[in-house]
Amino acid sequence: MSQQLPDEGIKQLEANPVGTSPKTEPTTPRKSVVAILAANANESSLYQPWLNHPPADIDVRIVPDFEVRQSLPADVDLVVTHNHYRWDELAVLRQAMTAGDRGVLVLSDGILEFRNSWQNYNIPAGSLLQPALAHKIATIGPAQSRWLESWGNHGCCETVGLPRLDTAAAANGWHAVPASRSAGESTGSAHLTLTAPHQPTHDTAQPACLLICSARTPAFSEAQWAVTLAQFRALSDYLQSHPPQHQGQPVSVRWRVAERIAAELNLPAESLSDGPITAALELASAVITMPSTVQLEAMLYRRPVATLDFFQVPNYVPAAWQITAAEHFGSIIPQLFEPCPLRQFYQDSLLRDQLWYHSSASERMWTLIANMARIAKRQRQQGIPIRFPRHILPPESSDLDHDCLTGSEIDWPRLQPLREAWRQQARAAKVDVWELTEVAAAYQRAQQYSEERGMLHRLVETHRQTVQTYEYNISQTQQYMTFLQENANELQSRWEDTKRRLEQRNTEFAETQQRVLQLAAEKKATHEKLQEAYADAKRKQDRVNELRTHYQEIRVAYEALKNQQASAQPTRPPPLLTEA
């Protein structure tokens, strides 16, 4: 973190740096060079609203391949980026900060969210501005500046706002106008009056619509995804079982959630809200969203906003309506369509602290960038390390008295109707309003005492009836206890009889088991004898087969011998026939 110097110290160092002689500006001074470290800056909503309208002495260059090159052009005076999450992005910023020859401005692209800041294990620890590798941080509002300065960024935060929300802030009447300024006249007065009414501006002629949103990245681990899906599933189940209504008419529900949530809930295509968020907010009557920048955008459109957050973690951006458990749906959702003026006033106060909307954020962005680039250019030419004053933009408290509203800017009749009625009665009676207030308070106390006395009588009567009911219940309980005792005795007798029969059955089972074991032993002995007889029969059969084979051999030998003998005998001539 660079050391911050007061404005006087900066001017002295620039005029006469230590160990150097005063330098003179060249006759044709070059422009201050600002490098935008974002490849898609021309299409990004974070840069596009202000990028193409630089001052005449500022040269803006987009450096798309800074992560690959790991270096910056030599003539760059100021680095502007929102990329500070990956190691290669951090390496470039660390190089610029370590060398001390480039100014570094990091842009905040939305609200601070606890899980993203402290429980996001997909990015290097400490890369989310804890503290920032930058000389300055362009924050979106005073509250964010206070939080980031408490993270070790003391003197580095400049409240700018979100340039992409300038159109919405102006269209909804949030931009401040000097109280003493007429058309085309400027007095230089620092006091401003807020022109915004403190009530929603939704077109009541259109049917009521509930817009439900998730963050662009609603979870950073599977455990977080389980909670995220559970809270949206609970909300979907409640809306299906309790369809919201407003003034007797059904409320349409539009979903603008991550694809995984839509797939898990099996949402029909016609219920999904796509296209620009501004169009969705124009149609919405109320908004339920996870903690995200959509929360502030909906507040700009004066929509009652409830945050859906079952994670039970701290909220850097509070809300007037908070849903932290499924039990809150029944009480919170109806309030969004009939918002309490006090809660709406609280939401407006939150927005005032969370988002700079009093003037053009694009103009403030260029004021900050141009001043930083000029200071960095002069200090580089003088050969001194880059340092910036604590405040480059005018502090919020000196630029606008927006930390609190003046009495003329608050719609007291809506917030405290009884107080306004007292004022009118005091004017009619020509008495001091506080005297009338005391009289009204005394009358209210008397009414309260009378009501409390009647309440006491009702409590006594209720107590008497309760005692009678108690005595009757005691009598009924005693009868029931007697009945239970009789049943218990009968059950005890049945249990003893069952136990006796069970013992008898156990004895019979033991005898039967003993007989079965005896029969099994006899069967085993018989089986062994049968095996022996079978083995003896097999031996005899083998002997018979052997004798049969031997007999066959003898017979064959006999036949051969017989044939041999027959062939060895001489042939006798046939006997001669003699005459008788």
Image (spheres, rainbow, N blue to C red):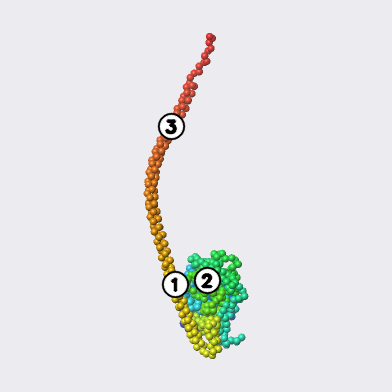
Residue 119 in the image: state x and y as whole percent.
47, 69
Q: Which residue is denoted by mark 1 in the rendering?
A: 466
2 or 3: tag closer to the N-terminus? 2
Contact (CB < 8 A) between labels 1 and 3? no
Q: Which amino acid lies under the numbered mark 1 shown in the image of this protein?
A: Thr
| Gap in angstroms between the C-alphas marked 1 and 3 | 107 Å
Residue 497 in the image: state x and y as whole percent.
39, 54
Residue 563 in the image: state x and y as whole percent.
48, 23
| Gap in angstroms between the C-alphas marked 2 and 3 | 99 Å
Q: Secondary structure at mark 3?
A: helix
Graded by Cα atoms within 10 Å as few (under 14), some (14 to 19) or many (20 or more), the crowding at tag 3 reads few
Q: Which residue is denoted by mark 3 in the rendering?
A: 544
Front in this rendered view, residue 80 or 338: 338
1 or 3: tag closer to the N-terminus? 1
Q: Residue furthest right?
A: 205
* Residue at image coords 60%, 67%: 270
Q: Quadrant location of residue 539?
A: top left
Residue 25 seen in the current view: no
Residue 507 in the image: state x and y as whole percent.
37, 49
Q: Quadrant location of residue 515?
A: top left
Residue 264 seen in the current view: yes
Contact (CB < 8 A) between labels 2 and 3? no
Q: Which residue is denoted by mark 2 in the rendering?
A: 330
**Residue 224, above or below 5:** above
Q: Which amino acid lies under the numbered mark 3 shown in the image of this protein?
A: Val
Q: Secondary structure at mark 1?
A: helix
In this rendering, the label closer to the viewer, 1 or 3: 1
